[in-house]
Image (cartoon, helix red, strand yellow):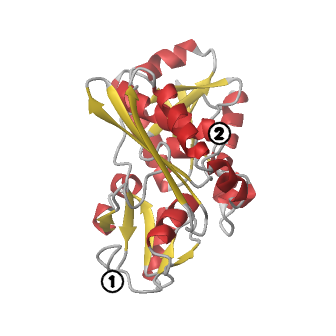
Amino acid sequence: MIRIATRRSRLALWQAEHVAARLREHGSEVELVPMVTQGDRILDRSLALVGGKGLFIKELEVALADDRADIAVHSMKDVPARIPEGFMLASVLAGASPLDALVSGAHASFDALPQGARVGTASIRRRCQLLHARPDLVIGMVRGNLDTRLGKLDAGEFDAIILACAGLERLGMGQRIRERLTPELSLPAIGQGVVGIECRAGDEAVARQLAMLHDPDTAQRVAAERALGAALGGDCSSPIAAFAEHIGSGRLRLRGRVGAADGSTLLHAAAEGSASDPAALGAGVAEALLAQGAAKLLREAPGA
């Protein structure tokens, strides 16, 4: 029996059920262990100000450490750059769309938003990129599960909100997407659209079962993005964006950005490298961003 620790949100449960179904296909018996994390309880403040997205992860890891669960299923964009001692990232599943989505009732695209439009997002990464492109926008914080965020949009609190395409599509809400924002406008978060599975370090029996779900190409992309984040010293609540893609012949292209929360500054760097050494590629792009002054922007970011 493999016990899966998961958050109770609809999207987290979808991800856990997806992993459970894949494991059952390979003959494993599976049981879900749903939990409410500290990150789910705090809805009135930005995660950057109260401990970062690691608040979604820690209690699941405690369940692993206490042997109340065998694996934890995570959105990779929520997983800190460094896995704590005693745990390991055992499997990375094939990724869905990494793009951000504009969701709006009245406006068909980002360019169609009126002057001074109210746009909801809890992400500093999204905030700095959107304000860099459109300083006239009024960015407001919107947190909670997808239904809560969409409810605030539908109630007229915002003209548009920005969500991940992958989450909407996984919950059958793809029709709510009015525009898929290009990476040129809104470079995705590290690991966006990817599900990862964590287990206790040294649990070889569980790791062997998880290995059957591992997607090497997605793992290479995520490794490059996570190496960039680690080299910058940021976390998943920092104003850091990264997007790696395979470009053929065993090569990866990685784009990275670091921005000021008010959108006044947005640093860019990109490079290509061997897919067999994604860590070196990530470190190289991070070095280029640091040479432009990324460290200062990260120090000044809310919650730094």
| Image: 274 above or below 267 | above
Horizontal side, residue 135 vs residue 102: left or right? right
Residue found at x 69% / y 67%: 45
| Image: 153 above or below 190 | below
Amino acid type, label 2: Leu
| Image: 109 above or below 250 | below
Q: Quadrant of residue 175?
A: bottom left
Amino acid type, label 1: Ala
Horizontal side, residue 230 vs residue 256: left or right? right
Label 2 secondary element: helix
Horizontal side, residue 34 vs residue 114: left or right? right
Residue found at x 63% / y 57%: 40
Of tags 2 and 1, the one toward the viewer is: 1
Q: Which of these two is toward me, 256 or 73?
A: 256
Task: For the C terminus, give its image quadrant.
Answer: bottom right
Disc on res. 60: 2
Q: Position of residue 278 (x, y in %)?
A: 46, 27
Q: Quadrant of residue 6?
A: top right
The disc, 2 or 1, on the residue closer to the chain's N-terminal end is: 2
According to the picture, the residue beneath numbered tag 1 turns out to be 106
**Given the current orientation, which residue lies at the most extreme front position?**
291
Q: Position of residue 46 (x, y in %)?
A: 66, 64
Residue found at x 45% / y 71%: 161
Q: Which of these two is toward me, 241 or 45?
A: 241
Structural crowding at the residue carrying mark 2, measured as other residues with C-alpha within 10 Å and reported as few (<14), some (14–19) or many (≥20): many
Disc on res. 64: none
Asked whether residue 233 appears in the rendered view, the answer is yes
Q: Position of residue 87 (x, y in %)?
A: 65, 25
Q: Position of residue 190 (x, y in %)?
A: 50, 44
